[in-house]
Structures are given as structure tokens and as C-alpha cells.
Amino acid sequence: MMRMSSRTCSLEGRQLQMTEACLFLSEYAALMLGCGATCIRIEKNVRRMARAMGMRPVLVIMPSSVELTLWDREHRLSSCNTEPIHRKGIRFDMNTRLSSLSWELADGKVTFDEARRRFAVISRLKPANKWLILILASLANASFCRLFGGDLVSMGIVLAATLAGFRLRQIMLEDGIDIRLVFAISAFVSSVIGSAGYVFGIGETPDVALGTSILYLIPGIPYLNSMSDLLDGHYLSFLSRFMDAAVLTACLSAGLCGGLLAMSIKWF
Amino acid sequence: MNFAMEIIQDGFFAAVAAVGFASISNPPKSAYPWCAAIAAVGHPVRFVLMESADCHIALASLAAALAIGCLAVFSAPAAKCPAEAISFPALLPMIPGMYAYRTFQNLVLCLCCGEGEFHHYFYLTSYNLLTCIVVLLVMAIGVTLPIFVFKKISFKATRYI
């Protein structure tokens, strides 16, 4: 009787441990997915940590949630949790730190409690300075204009168009406005400013200026992530990410068309 | 301007574009110089292949993405971040953005025109869509292939931060 009761206690303790591990790992996977990590990396990181804790994970990645089932090695105890995605935008800094955390836990450099504490710190990481991003993104788009053969005047127009459109995007996203509307409005504003070459008859390459003025809005990383998932056989995630990016592209195209109509430019 | 100067200019502006677009996706600070350097090598590969060898954009993008992927995998341990945190931002100047939005614009024009022009706009819609998808796919293949081939290096890059 005594032996049975102590065995029950140890099983209960082990079950509690598994439940805590399952909650942590599912939150970890949801945050990684939310910050734009590829499915293969999420699976590898979760598997690495679970194995280090003596458990076997089964991870199902859905478009808006992750489902994790943890089994012990003997296949006697299990724990399951479905966690909604913690959407953070594309955050490679979080991705890097979370990947590093998985190695630290797997290598025994940090305890489980310490890993949970660090995870909480990482999930609260603030994004880079918004003014710095604004300037860098504007310079990037102006350089992009040059890559497409734009002259200096066109580069200046694209710089101004990106500064205005990107700042508007930042303000509207901070105010919690729907991202699709944000993309359409930003593209509209950028294309109206980007059409300055046509309107004022300045520069040799007004078409390049107008064409590149909205390219900063193209969701490049989601497109690349979706293709990476496709190659890895995660077709649901591929489709979900590709469609998210395609919808945003459609919205910015609508904004551009609106800008062209507003400025009475026949571009095609 | 001679061809060598054009290549240098292409590399320089690709590096500025890569750093700027990378900043939107918040990479770790240590990744910025690597993104710039790798984009400055990768983009001119595509430029040279398209301009001098008359390569199709898809083939040239595949070669450039392979170069970027290989460089990113081997520099990830030094940059102390995952390979894709360097390679994906370095690829951003090559994303076929214009093809993507022209697909939707021509789709709208398909619906707003008569039968005579429909075939033309439908051709443009299909051409832009196919080019966009194929270029994206080959870029992803090119950049992912080195990650899969050198798995031990690419997935252990964040081990000793």
C-alpha cells in the first residue's frame, strides 16, 4: 500500500512537471511562430528542449495556433496544450534569442525555471528605435530606386514618398488600425508623392520613382518564410503565410491604383 | 560608366537596401554588417548574370540566392544568429515586388476592359504572377539549400552566444 502510494505521488509529480514543460514549450513555439521563425526551426528548437527534459514532443503548427503533445519516454504520461500565436511581426532578434535559449536549456546551462524567466524577458523585448527604422527604410527604398535605374531626382522623390508613407504606417499600426487598411493607405500616400516626377515634370525616370515608391511595403520576409515552409513540407503554414502576404500585396496594389487615379496618371 | 563601376555601385546600393529593409524585421545588431556584406556580394551576382550573360531573372536569382545562402550559413556562427536572420534580409533587395503588385493591377484591368484587351491583360497577369512565384521559389530554394546541406553549422549557430 505504502509502495503504491509513493509511486502514485511520483507519477503525479512527473505529470505536473510534464504539464509545466508542455505549457512552456507550447508558449515558446507560439512566440517563435508569431515572430516569423520558419517551421523547421521551431520544430528543431522544441524537439531539442523536450528531449533534454526526457520527453518526446509532437508539434502541430496551424495558421493561428500551435498544438503540442508531450510524451514521457515510456509512453505512459502525456500532456497537451493548444496555444494561440503571439503575433509580434517579424522579429529576428527574438528568433535569435529564443534559439539561443533552446541550446542553453538543452546543454544544461540553465535550469527550467531560469529558462522560463528568460523566456518572459525575451517576450517583452522592445523593437528597435522607430525613427532609426524610418530613416534606414527610406534610404533603403531610395537605394532600391537606384538599383532599378532611377536617377538622383527619382531617388529624392522615393525618399520623400517612403518617409511619409512609412511614418504613416507606423502611426496607424500604433493606433491599432487593421494592417490591410494601413497598407492600402500608406501605398496611396507614397504613390501620390511618388508621382511627383510626372506631375512636376522633373527627373528622367518618373516611372521608376513611381514604381519603387511603394516597394518598402512588399512583405518580403513572409514570402520567403512561406517558401521555406513549402520546401520543408509544411503546406498549411506555407499557404497561410503566402496568402497573408498576397492579401497585403493586393491591398498595397489597391492603394497604388487609388494614387494613380487621384493623380490622373495613365501608367499602363 | 564602365561595367566594373556598375557592379560596385550595384553592390553598394544593394547593401544599403538590405540594411534598411532588414531594420524593419528587427535583426540582432550583430547581423547588420553581415547582411550588408552578403547583399553586396549576392545582388551583383544576379546583376552580372542578367546583364552580361543574358540570364533569365529566375536563373540569376537562383545563383544569387545560393551565393547568399552559402555565405550566410558560414557567417552565422560569427554573427551569432540563425542563418536566416542574415540571409533573408540580404535577399530582400531581390524580392520581385514589382511583379507581385503588377499581378494584382493587371487582374483589375482584366475585369475593366473589353474582349480585345482582355487577352493582353490576362497574359500580363499570368506572366507577372508566374515570374513572381518562380523567382520567390528559386530564391527560397537557393537560400534554404545550404541550410539543409550544412545542417550542423546552420542550426548550431546560436549555440555559443
Image: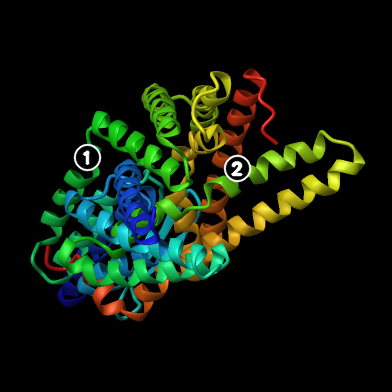
**Visible in this render: residue A136?**
yes
Q: Residues within 10 Å of mark 2 (few under 14, many from 20)?
A: many
Which colouring convention does the figure follow? rainbow
How far apart are the alpha carbons under marks 2 and 1?
A: 35 Å
* Helix, strand or loop under label 1: loop
The residue lying toward the viewer, choosing from A216 and B10, is B10
Badge 1, how many Cα within 10 Å: few under 14, some, many 20+?
few
The residue singled out by tag 1 in the image is A124
Q: Quadrant of the N terminus of chain A?
A: bottom left
Q: Amino acid at mark 1?
A: Arg
Query: Which residue occupies 46% across, 24% down?
Result: A177
* One can see residue A79 in this view: no
Task: Name the residue type under label 2.
Answer: Tyr
Q: Chain of mark 1?
A: A
Q: Which residue is mark 2?
A: B101
The disc label shown at residue A250, or none: none
Task: Work out whether A137 lies above or below B6.
Answer: above
* Residue drawn where x is 37% and y is 54% of the image: B10
Q: In this rendering, which labeled residue sits more in front, label 2 or label 1? A: 2
Q: Is residue B61 above or below residue B12?
A: below
Which quadrant holds residue A136? top left
* A38 with respect to A120 (left or right): right
Chain letter behind tag 2:
B
- Picture quarter with the C terminus of chain A: top right
Q: Secondary structure at mark 2?
A: helix
Question: Up-down: is A195 above or below A37?
Answer: above
Relative image position of residue A107 (x, y in whole percent): 13, 72
Residue contact between numbered discs 2 and 1, judged by CB atoms under 8 Å: no
In this view, the residue in front, A28 or B124, is B124
Q: Is residue A225 left or right of residue A119?
A: right
Residue A262 image position (x, y, % from top left): 63, 18
